[in-house]
Amino acid sequence: MKIGNVEVTGYAALAPMAGVADRAFRRICADFGASYVVSEMVSAKGISYNSEKSAKLMESDSRCPSAVQLFGDDPETIAYAAEFAKRYNPDIIDINMGCPAPKISGNGSGCALMKNPRLCGKIVKAAKRATNIPVTVKIRKGWDSENINAVEVAKYCEENGADALTIHGRTRDQFYSGKADWDIIAQVKQQLSIPVIGNGDITDAESAAAMYEHTNCDYVMIGRGALGNPWIFRQINAYFSRDTFIVPPSIDERLSVMYKHIKLACEYKGERIGVQESRKHIGWYLKGFHGAAALRNEAGKVSTLDDVEGLIYKVRLEILNHS
């Protein structure tokens, strides 16, 4: 797949997830075969106010094409943030028009933009004017079941210069419940000439293959299916290349990668913040382990890397006692 002048190889991308897809997680997923990664949402308004916290979200060192995702509802502010983002050398600028969170959509950004397709077009046009790198958009099926307008919004974005578009097959009021509608992804793909990336309900290699077949999309993007499971990208790549059979990771590998992930977070953010913000990731990595509920409770208390090492020791002991 080519997004503008950016060549994206492989078969699956990591979705932008606020508070989750940080620099450390993007690096881990890229190491396991994610061929394209997108940052957490960055507030365009925050950038215009010189927010150091917002700017820090743009930092990346993944070994594959990466995008900075911006959110906001004002074309000129988006344009300023897109131009500012260039100092962090992203390969792509992505505009968030799909976030369902009340804090975002309640202020006119994210999925709320889909209620005004013309504004969506103006935002894309402004971002394109401000930068010489590809601009993409991420949308949803629509605002709610009475307003399914993904095709209309997608067309406005393409007409105003979008280089690719990602669509999540749920409406804003669904959040992440129910089943993603892959038919709407197929409809958008049929109407656009730019690459279309499908998102929603991909949990393994088989569901990735099913989305490709059902929608004819150019690429797939994985969000929740990668939580505690960066191996999903390795499995998908092997499935499509058909030259390797990938067995599920061993317990030792899961714990080793979890620790590597947390150490990276500490390198980027400092030990205190790195460990605190990794607690949720620990819970996801430990899903399915014997005594997982109690272990996740322990994970909620870790504050240092020594605490994490102690937790890993407890996990190994728990497994040994029940083997």
Image (spheres, rainbow, N blue to C red):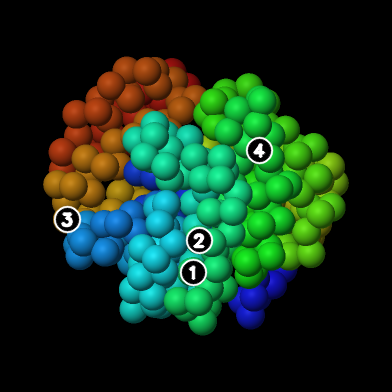
Identify the secondary structure beneath mark 3.
loop
The amino acid on which the numbered mark 1 sits, given as a three-letter code, is: Ala
Query: Is residue 226 visible from the viewing direction of this image?
Result: no
Please give the name of the residue rendered at 16% of the width and 51% of the height, measured from the top-left corner: 271
Q: Which residue is mark 1?
A: 126
Alpha carbon separation for disc pair 3 and 4? 39 Å
Identify the secondary structure beneath mark 2.
helix
Badge 4: few (under 14), some or many (20 or more) residues near its Cα, within 10 Å?
many
Q: Which residue is mark 4?
A: 141
Badge 2: few (under 14), some or many (20 or more) residues near its Cα, within 10 Å?
many
Q: Position of residue 278 (x, y in %)?
A: 30, 42
Residue 134 is marked as none
Please report whichever mark, 3 or 1, sits nearer to the chain's N-terminal start: 1
Please give the name of the residue rendered at 41% of the width and 69% of the height, measured from the top-left corner: 79
Which one is in front in this view, the residue at disc 3 or the one at disc 4?
A: 4
Q: Marks 2 and 4: CB-CB under 8 Å?
A: no
Query: Is residue 269 visible from the viewing direction of this image?
Result: yes
Q: Position of residue 307 (x, y in %)?
A: 18, 38
The foreground one among 146 and 136 is 146
Q: Which residue is mark 2?
A: 123
The amino acid on which the numbered mark 2 sits, given as a three-letter code, is: Ile
Which one is in front in this view, the residue at disc 2 or the one at disc 3?
A: 2
